[in-house]
Amino acid sequence: MTTATAIAHPNIALIKYWGKADEAMSLPATGSLSMTLDVFPTRTTVTVGEGAGAGSNATAPDTLTLNDRPATDAELGRVTRFLDLVRELAGDERPAAVVSTNTVPTGAGLASSASGFAALATAAAAAYGLDLDVRALSRLARRGSGSASRSIPGGVAIWHAGDDAASFSETVAAPPLAMVIATVDAGEKHVSSREAMRRTIATSPFFPAWVTSTAASLERMVEACAAGDFTRIGELTESNALRMHATIQSAEPPIRYLTAASTRVFDAVAGMRVAGLEAYATADAGPNVVVLTRPDDREAVAAELSANAGIAQPVTTLPGPAARLESGGGADATGPAASGAGTAPGAGAPA
Ligand code: 2P0
């Protein structure tokens, strides 16, 4: 029996991934760039062999326990399809028992699928005896969930568009960054990002412009990161997020993830800039807003969000670590170590 446990953290994109070029291979329409967080890790244990995988599904009797409860059929099916890829790579047909614990509310707009599939890829590769480097592991994690690719390397990561071999993630140099998570609603999102991406591609007249403009913004973002230009990084981040939401809203029927409460946070962030506190807002496929700032300003931004935007418990985070096996031998020795500076997530913590 072989067991491996891995830990991975979520990431928030500064240049967003929205839309696939190839759904079966999980290849993105554009590249994207994110910061991995040092809060809300997912811890996943994969066990292969003797007694593991006594599930009822005869074709691949894996078992999955998610946050201390048996997974739904849909959750198990997605994990089994992913493990099938690992089994094919390893030439090993044995089923697995998977136990996973998320510390971020599932499905609430701060992608638990990113940390989830990054941790699963790292643990499953080790449990099935595969020796994969960061590039290969990020390509594997991509097949589970696109954004999971970016949670394999640590810190600020770029996920390249391209064919299967070229579409991997790697850490890029960037100036010191911090984020403050403003949870406006911790509930489940009404349309999954996977479904919303499909609808956007199929119906939005703006989608082609999203693709060309995001590719251009990614190039500028890489330049700004290399130059250590925080202001440019922030401007590109907020602009790209609003373009993504505009594109999503232009689908038919429309999808609106941002609410009045989200808009109040964007307004508060604009107000901070006017007052000389440099901060920029972004949001994923949900109403919650994440504010990019400099590490030295993160507590001031959190205080402003509490005082002026009605955010009960803003959570601050610095760049987080690479996905890693719990017993050493991590996926990437080059990623920054966990800073440990994030505010501990509590009950009702951000989504
Ligand atoms: C991102 N999002 O770049 C964008 C911004 C949400 C909004 O990546 O279908 O859960 O599993 O590849 O990775 C969410 O998409 O989608 C996402 P799949 P995923 O972070």
Image (cartoon, rainbow, N blue to C red):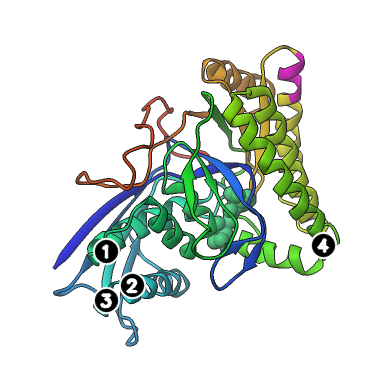
Q: Is residue 274 above or below residue 284?
A: above
Q: Amino acid at mark 3?
A: Pro
Dot 3 and dot 1 residues touching (CB under 8 Å): no
Report crowding for label 2: few under 14, some 14 to 19, many 20 or more residues within 10 A (C-alpha): some
The answer to whether one can see residue 128 in this image is yes
Q: Residue at x 67, y 19 (%)?
A: 278
Could you tell me how far apart the alpha carbons at marks 2 and 1 are, in whole angstroms?
Answer: 8 Å
User: Nearer the viewer's eye, disc 3 or disc 1?
Assistant: 1
Q: Earlier in the sequence, mark 2 or mark 1?
A: 2
Q: Amino acid at mark 2?
A: Leu
Check mark 3 vs ligand 1: CB closer than 8 Å? yes or no. Answer: no
Q: Which residue is mark 2?
A: 89
Dot 2 and dot 1 residues touching (CB under 8 Å): yes
Q: Earlier in the sequence, mark 3 or mark 2?
A: 2
Q: Which residue is mark 4?
A: 204
Q: Is residue 102 above or below residue 283?
A: below
Q: Earlier in the sequence, mark 1 or mark 4?
A: 1
Report crowding for label 4: few under 14, some 14 to 19, many 20 or more residues within 10 A (C-alpha): many
Residue 274 on image: x %, y %: 77, 15
Q: Amino acid at mark 4?
A: Ser
Label placed on residue 130: 1
Could you tell me how far apart the alpha carbons at marks 1 and 4 are, in whole angstroms?
Answer: 41 Å
Q: Amino acid at mark 1?
A: Leu
Could you tell me how far apart the alpha carbons at marks 3 and 1 are, in whole angstroms?
Answer: 15 Å
- Say which of 114 and 142 sits in front: 142
Residue 221 on image: x %, y %: 65, 36
Q: Which residue is mark 3?
A: 95
Highlighted range, magenta: 270-274
